[in-house]
Image (spheres, helix red, strand yellow):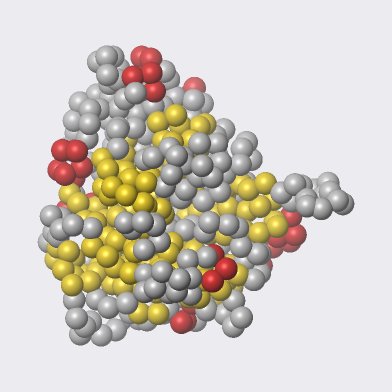
Amino acid sequence: MEEPPAPSSVLGATEEPGSSAEVMEEVTPCSVNYPLFQQEDKRGITYRIPALLYVPPAHTFLAFAEKRSTSKDEDALYLVLRRGLRTGHSVQWGPMKPLMEATLPGHRTMNPCPVWERKSGHVFLFFICVQDHVTERQQIDAGCSWSKLRDLTEEVIGPEVKHWATFAVGPGHGTQLQSGRLIIPAYAYYIPPWFCFRLPCNTKAHSLMFYSDDMGTTWHHGSLIRSMVTVECQVAEVIGKAGPPVLYCSARTPNRCRAEALSTNHGECFQTLCLSQQLSEPPHGCQGSVVSFQPLKSPCRCQDLSGRDVHSIEQSRLLDSPLRLQEEAGMPSKLWLLFSHPTNKKRRLDLGIYLNQTPLEESCWSHPWVLYHGPCGYSDLAVVEEEGLFGCLFECGTKLECEQIAFHLFTDQELLGHRQGDCVSPAGS
């Protein structure tokens, strides 16, 4: 969302097997950006806030968006879904379907945030119903039918909600860690305990995580990331050559740079945030997406333009020393990161894909591969790991970013082919 909603709620749905006898439209890696949701009128029906999820057993992409009566946040109506069946390196998209199961009377449904639970095969779709609820729906297969919605506001937040002026989940995908924990990124506008009696009160936004350790049966929330103002965020699990898995967080800020933080306890709390000088934000910031993946091929060490190892120039401030010393300096990690976000520092223009081969080191993001030239906005990434495939669902247009939500399928070879040199330090940029 562009602006924080009024206090909101969490919902969950379960999907049952359904008919796939529908007209399909095919997308391949060589295809141009394919519009999945198209604005119907410049002053009327608009689709915003993409979320993308890949369900491996069904070989299916689930593409979610908000349907709005105009492009404004306050005119959100309900969520819509398109299902994409993957065959090899092509995806065939079915028609758009409204998710009326994900609604509450008198509320706007916003911020889709799906996550797949690999053991049960369920997909949990989190979203907010603006006024006063966070809700979740759960599905059994690949988006054909859904369970009744479940309001999680009281369970997840409890009495602490009185200190949150408003909150939201996502938008974009959640993730499941190797431990089995499900993670839903979120943010809240926190009311200080000393609450000012004069209005407006000085609330500040902080990112945090909702999580479940029992396959989505019960949910809890982690600590607010308090060291600076952060809003919409996404997380991905990363693993170095040594040491335990670490949860990486990339968050939107008003500070003209993305905020980055790492958690060593699966998202319950994060170490001190750092601003990434390589990942710029336009004025007021913009949502971005991050995923981790296991590379099929391992290239060379991370270097700046002078050819020196980045690690020899600047060690990571993201990790405390004991954990950092367990990592092999400058060597590519077992899991890499991919990040999508507008690349222009002045406006939401030119959607870029950034690669990080050593996520536990600072300043190791590649120059962006510009996937779309022109106005762009929110985006979401998904990985088909066994095929070396990636999907990106993003807002774009010729004049305005809200004209359509497009899908782009690309391979790991395309990604590496567009990489403009290995990790470039700020000094070398």
Residue 320, compared with residue 379, is above or below; it is above
Q: Position of residue 240 (x, y in %)?
A: 34, 33
The residue closer to the viewer here, 353 or 53, is 353
Q: Is residue 67 left or right of residue 95?
A: right
Q: Is residue 402 left or right of residue 75?
A: left
Q: Is residue 172 left or right of residue 34?
A: right
What residue occupies the far right of the structure in this picture? 197
The residue closer to the viewer here, 239 or 38, is 38
Residue 298 in which image quadrant:
top left
Residue 323, compared with residue 336, is above or below; it is above
The residue closer to the viewer here, 171 or 149, is 171
Residue 57 in which image quadrant:
bottom left
Residue 186 in which image quadrant:
bottom right
At a point 28% along the width and 49% down the height, the residue shown is: 372
At a point 40% along the width and 31% down the height, the residue shown is: 278
At a point 34% along the width and 23% down the height, the residue shown is: 429
The answer to whether any part of residue 261 appears in the image is no
Q: Position of residue 200 (x, y in %)?
A: 78, 52
Q: Position of residue 418 (x, y in %)?
A: 19, 38
Q: Position of residue 361 (x, y in %)?
A: 39, 27
The answer to whether any part of residue 144 appears in the image is yes
The residue closer to the viewer here, 27 or 239, is 27
At a point 52% along the width and 31% down the height, the residue shown is: 274
User: How many numbered marks have been drawn onto this rendered protein structure?
Assistant: 0
